[in-house]
Image (cartoon, rainbow, N blue to C red):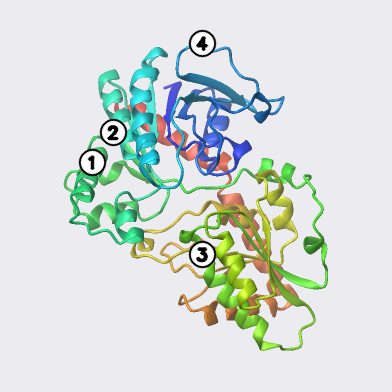
Amino acid sequence: MKNIWIINHYAIPPKFGGLNRHYYFSKYLSNMGYKVKIFTASKIHNSKINVFNSPSDAFSQHEEKSSHALKNIKEINFDGVTYTFLKTSNYKNNGLSRIKNMLEFPYRVLTCCKKFKKPDVIYTSSPSPFAALIAVRMAKKFKIPIILEVRDLWPESIVAYKGISPKNPIIRFLYLLEKYLYKHANCIIFTMEGGKEYIKSKKLENIVDLSKVYNINNGVDLDEYQKSLENHFEDFDLEDKCTFKVIYAGSIREVNHLNDLLDAAKIIQNKKQVQPKKIKFLIYGDGTEKKALEDRCNSEKIQNIIFKGHIQRKFIPYALSKADLNIITVRQTDIMRFGCSLNKLFDYMASGKPIVSNLQVNYDLIQRYNCGITTKTKSATDLANAIEQVYTLSHDSYLNMCKNARKAAEDYDYKLLTRKLNEIILSLDKKT
C-alpha cells in the first residue's frame, strides 16, 4: 500500500498552528516511500483564512502553489508536504455557517477526489462524522481498506460539553452514524488510550472487533522542536530571572477553563508570603474567552497574570524553554475516563519543564512519567498548592521532573508514532 489519502476536514498546515498530526505522518510516511495526499477544507479552522480568497502574500516564499487547474481544488506545498484544499465557505463560531461548511466538505470530497488516481488505502479523521462517512463509502467503492481515526468522541463529547440529552433526535442519529463508521472501518485508531473501553461502554463489542482497535497518541516532532528553539523573540517577562514563570500556551476558549488558573493565581497572590522569587503567570494565546478573562483580572486586581496575546507556533518552543513550569487547565467531563491526548501536553514535555494539570484523566501521562503534578480535585486551592509544590521542590527533584518530561517527549516523537502507523498499514495489507 504505497498510495494513501488522508481525508481530514481540519488538517491545518504548520504555518497556521493547530493540529499538525497529519503533516508529520505525511512527512515521515513519505520518507518510508509512501505517496501521501492530504485532502482538507480551504477554510482554515480557528482563523480568518480561506486559501481560495486569501491574498497571495499570505503564503511565504518557500510554500509554492501548484499549477493544479481543477475547479474547486487548490494544492499548496508546505515544507515538502502537499495539502489539497477543497473549496468550502467561511464560517464563524458554531452557527449555521459552520454547519454549511461541515456539509460542503464531504460533498467536495465526493466530487473532487475522484479526479485523482485511486489510492491503496484511505485514512480519515474525525471529528467530522460526515466526511468520515463519505470516506468509508468511497473505500467500499474502491474496494480498499479504510482507517478511521477518532480524535474526538462524537457525539459523546457534544453530550458531555454541551449538556444535550443523548435522547435528542440529532444525537441519536449521530450515535447511529458512529456505530456505522466503527463497524465498517478496517481499523480504528483512537488518540486516547481508552478506545476499547469506550466501545465496550457503548456495548458495541459484538459488532466491532476489538483486535482492529489501536491507540496512537498525539505527539511532537523533536527535530523540528529543537530547530524552533532558534526562533528567539524579545519578551521582557520571559527573560525576567527574578520570577518563577508559569506558562500557559494555547487556545483561550470555554473548554480550556482558564478561570481555574485565575482562581489559583488569585490565591497565590493573596497569600502575600515572602518568596525568593515571585510566581508570575504568562498566558500565550487567543480565543473567545480572552477579553472576559482580562476584564476579570482588572476588576479583581489579579496582578500576577499577564496575557501575552497570540503567539506564532514557531515561537512556542522558545517561550516554553524559558518557563519554570507549564500549566494545563481543561473543563472536566466524564469522557476523560477514556483518556485524553492534548496537543499542548507534548509541546510542554518537549520543553523539559515540569507540568501541573487540574485535569483528572485516566491514562495520565504526567503521572505515568512523574513529570509534574495532576491535582486530585478541580479546586483552585489544589491547583495553587500544586504550583507551589513544584516551586518549592529541591534542585535535584526539580531536575528529575525536567528529565522525565523530556523522556516522555522522546517516547511520543512523531518518528516513532509514524512507525506504529506504518505497522498498522502493513497489517491491513496482509488482511486484504
- The residue under label 2 is 133
Q: Residues within 10 Å of mark 4 (few under 14, many from 20)?
A: few
- The residue under label 1 is 177
Label 2 vs 1, first from the N-terminus:
2
Is residue 267 placed above or below 77 in the rendered structure?
A: below
In the image, what residue type sits under mark 4?
A: Ala
On screen, residue 306 versus residue 13, left or right, reads: right
Q: Nearer the viewer, mark 3 or mark 4?
A: 4
> Which residue is painted at 43% across and 48% down in the image?
191
In the image, what residue type sits under mark 3?
A: Arg
Quote the CA–CA distance across marks 3 and 4.
51 Å
Q: Residues within 10 Å of mark 2 (few under 14, many from 20)?
A: many
Label 3 vs 1, first from the N-terminus:
1
Instruction: Using the image, tell me which numbered label, if any, was put on residue 74.
Output: none
Label 2 vs 3, first from the N-terminus:
2
- The residue under label 4 is 69
Instruction: Using the image, tell me which numbered label, if any, was put on residue 368.
Output: 3
Instruction: Let me know if residue 371 appears in the view.
Output: no
Quote the CA–CA distance across marks 2 and 1.
8 Å
User: For this rendering, which residue is in front, 319 or 1?
Assistant: 319
Quote the CA–CA distance across marks 4 and 1.
35 Å
Q: Are marks 2 and 1 in contact (CB under 8 Å)?
A: yes
Residue 55 appears in which quarter of the rendering? top right
Is residue 18 placed above or below 282 in the rendered structure?
A: above
Q: Which x, y percent locates residue 329? A: 52, 65
- Mark 4 residue element: loop
- Mark 2 residue element: helix
